[in-house]
Amino acid sequence: MADEAARQAAGSPAETRTRRGRGALRALGTGVITGAADDDPSAIGTYASAGARFGLGFLWIAPVLLPMMIVVVYLSAKIGQVYGKGLFAAIRDHYPRKVLYPLVAGAFIGNVIEAAANLGGIGAALNLLVPLPVPAIVVGTAVVIFAFQYFGSYALLRTIFQWLALALFAYVAAAILAKPDIREVLYATVTPRIRFDAEFLSMVVACIGTSLSAYVYTWQSNQEVEEQIERGKRHWWQRRGASRGELRRVRRDVFVGMLFSNVILYFIILATGVTLHPAGQTEIETAAQAASALEPLAGEAAKYLFALGVVGVGFLAVPVMTTGAAYDLVQGIGREGSLNDRPNEAKLFYGTIAAVTVIAVGLNFLGFNPMKALVWSGIVQGFSVPPLLLMMMLMTNNRTLMGARTNGWVTNLFGGATMLVTFAATTALVASWFW
């Protein structure tokens, strides 16, 4: 009787395979969400500027960034999966307040600036598709995004985000429409062309900053926690620890997401590098200009594909940033908050999302250039990468936090190399300002 009941509960082998398949698809979906959020309008603006300014000579940055992106996001995911809390909650539990508060402040401010710049980017791009004033589009976009965060569940948001991620394939299509020379593209991809002037190094740091943005760490670590809460592990003690199989799932999830993000990065640089740069369009001032400049060179479809990509991923990335700011704040002061909670159960958490959204909208009425703000926000993020990465390396090698799941030598090798590269790039940029 007991054996029969157990077999019925487990279901048929086909049902078991179906459940496993759905779980795998959901895992891949969460990785793609993070990867798509990493290619936010800030990143799109930065990569488009890089392609326009330096042409195909900047394609090499994509394969160089890929292992760095994987290891950094894996470290943050590992903290959420093994320790059972988000990044800043873990820092608060184990490190002094003088370490915690500057990191929280930097990440929180970075999220606000990124959200504001990305709302501006959405407004400029959507203005190409809908003839409405950009300020009205910014306000309307912010209202729609917050409504989904406030009234929707975590499962609903995840599903919406997975579909919005598909908008990024518009850049693959835009690059194909440009009809690049395949041999020239392949040569530029594997042959770095490096300059040591402020203009070039600023773009390198901006690309590092946008691909390794702090909000991605916060989101990924907390997404691991949210997934566990959704499965019923609402208490911290239920989430502590991880099996080898769970960490394999995390590595696969992160690899797929970062590979997706990196491929899109590559095709954005390719699309603008093969069209705008040869035509002398080396200065990109707005998202609308970047899209419009593609029209006479690659056709009207390329213009609309570029704008569609900004809008689609913007609707995904802005809530990741505003929610990330809420995670940063509540965890920094020792409180809890989750997208699996109802608003009346996490008033500070949802109140912070609302406040950050309002501030981000307000910053768009100060008259800054959205495309330049996107690139500069990437540079600011680039300077925040080395200290946050150092902290994550220390945490994932701390047995008090990780137990038996501390880093192996391969993870430490790639993590240490990434930390050195990001520090060297930011140091070289500062040096170039003086010499």
Image (cartoon, grey):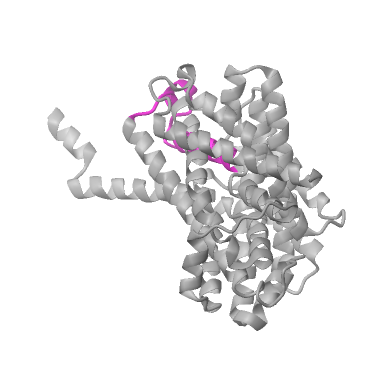
**Is residue 26 or residue 157 the one in the foreground?**
26
Q: Residue at 66% of width from left, 73% of height from top?
A: 276
Magenta portion: prevailing SS class: helix
Residue at 47%, 56% (x, y): give it. 260
Picture coordinates of residue 382, whole percent (x, y):
66, 43
Q: Quadrant of residue 6?
A: top left
In the rendered image, which quarter contains the N terminus? top left
Q: Position of residue 217 (x, y in %)?
A: 57, 39
Q: Is residue 13 above or below residue 105?
A: below
18 over 170 or under it: above or below: above
Res 278 seen here: yes
371 to the left or right of 192: right
Left or right, residue 244 beside residue 376: left
- Name the one closer to the observer, 243 or 269: 269
> Who is closer to the viewer here, 220 or 195?
195
- The outermost residue toward the front is 435
* Residue at x 52% of width, y 58% of height: 165
Q: Quadrant of residue 143?
A: bottom right
Report the span colored magenta: 216-243
The answer to whether any part of residue 339 appears in the image is: no
Q: Position of residue 417 (x, y in %)?
A: 52, 37
- Does residue 19 show up magenta in the picture? no
* Left or right relative to 267: residue 357: right
Depth order, front residue of 306/58:
58
Magenta region includes residue 217: yes
Residue at figure coordinates x 67%, y 72% from the top left: 291
x, y percent for residue 38? 57, 50
Q: Is residue 162 above or below residue 185?
A: above
Q: Quadrant of residue 289?
A: bottom right
